[in-house]
Amino acid sequence: MPERPGQLRSDPVPVFHLYGEDGQWLMPDLVHVEPIAARSRLHNWEIKPHRHHGLFQLLWLRQGNARLYLDGEVGAIEGGAVLLVPQHCVHGFRFSRGARGLVVTIAYPLLVRLGIEAPSRTDGSGRSQLCRLDDLAAREPVEVLLAALEQEYATQAEHRGLLLESMIGALLAWLLRAPEPQAEMPALARARQHLAAFSAEVERSYLLHLPLAHYADKLGISSAHLNAVCRQLTQRSALEIIHARLMLEARRSLAYSSMSIRDISESLGFGDPAYFTRFFRRLSGGLAPRDFRQRAMSMAAGH
């Protein structure tokens, strides 16, 4: 059983897109795959406690071992384990030198598209789930899929996106069949449930540009309470979370479609393309939609 080091720290826990990166991904892929060593080696094999908003992570420790920190609990994992980490869960690792495996980061809109909106172990309670591959009837196909996912992610071959999504869907389906151990709800569980419900409502309604009161009413709390929950767990306001979802869709449309700026503006609920451009510039650090598209096309071409 994990040992308890005490209460969670009162100082803010960093919220990252990827560990150590404060900026947004330029290319709006809904999945990111990298070896454990790629990032942990840069930090002396230690990933300090942090959390993500809007991102689900799957960590496959293929070889080696690691000490892990999960929402105030400390434990250990060894090779042959997969850890599922939902958004808002505070997590950190100290890997043995030379540890091998993968970290797969998945944006929640992809989980929704795959029909994995809120399985019991990835819901608003913020609980992580450890799967020991020895306990899975499908261990061999899971390991084969994880290796294939790493290989496919590194290519730019035709139908890459479809293959990545299919492999992730199959992986999660097998992993979520694993028996779920009983565990008590961690501190701040109620706030996490509110945030999970808010995130789901944003996913359904972000194109409608609804007022914040709409979301608060859906949750049965005040707008001030909703904002407090968002800032407590994500260090962003509720409106910033809604805007981030709009920006994700804007970046994807600009990078992967030939739609005009006007058409993208209308599809995202902006009546005025000039307003959309101002919105995009403000949230992208001054980059105009047209400039973003050119940069994304250049990156896709390998320039």
Image: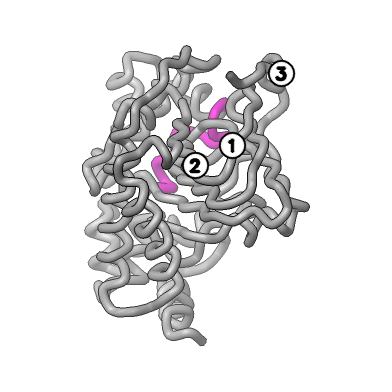
Q: Residues within 10 Å of mark 3 (few under 14, many from 20)?
A: few
- The three-letter amino acid code for the residue at tag 3 is Pro
- For residue 256, side relative to residue 15 (left or right): left
* Above or below, 185 relative to 80: above
Q: Residues within 10 Å of mark 2 (few under 14, many from 20)?
A: many
Q: Secondary structure at mark 1?
A: strand
- Residue 150's x, y, as percent? 44, 64
Q: Secondary structure at mark 2?
A: strand
Give how far apart the Cα atoms at labels 3 and 1 are.
17 Å
Residue 241 within the segment the image draws in magenta: yes
The reply to whether discs 1 and 2 touch (Cβ–Cβ < 8 Å) is yes
Give how far apart the Cα atoms at labels 1 and 2 are.
7 Å
Residue range in magenta is 232-246
For image coordinates 27% across by 68% down, the residue present is: 262
Q: Give the residue number, with chain letter if any, for mark 2.
A: 81
For image coordinates 37% across by 59% down, the residue present is: 144
Q: Residues within 10 Å of mark 1 (few under 14, many from 20)?
A: some
For image coordinates 52% across by 68% down, the residue present is: 287
Q: Give the residue number, with chain letter if any, for mark 3.
A: 5
- The three-letter amino acid code for the residue at tag 1 is Ile
Total numbered circles: 3
- Residue 239's x, y, as percent? 44, 37
Q: Main secondary structure of the magenta part?
A: helix
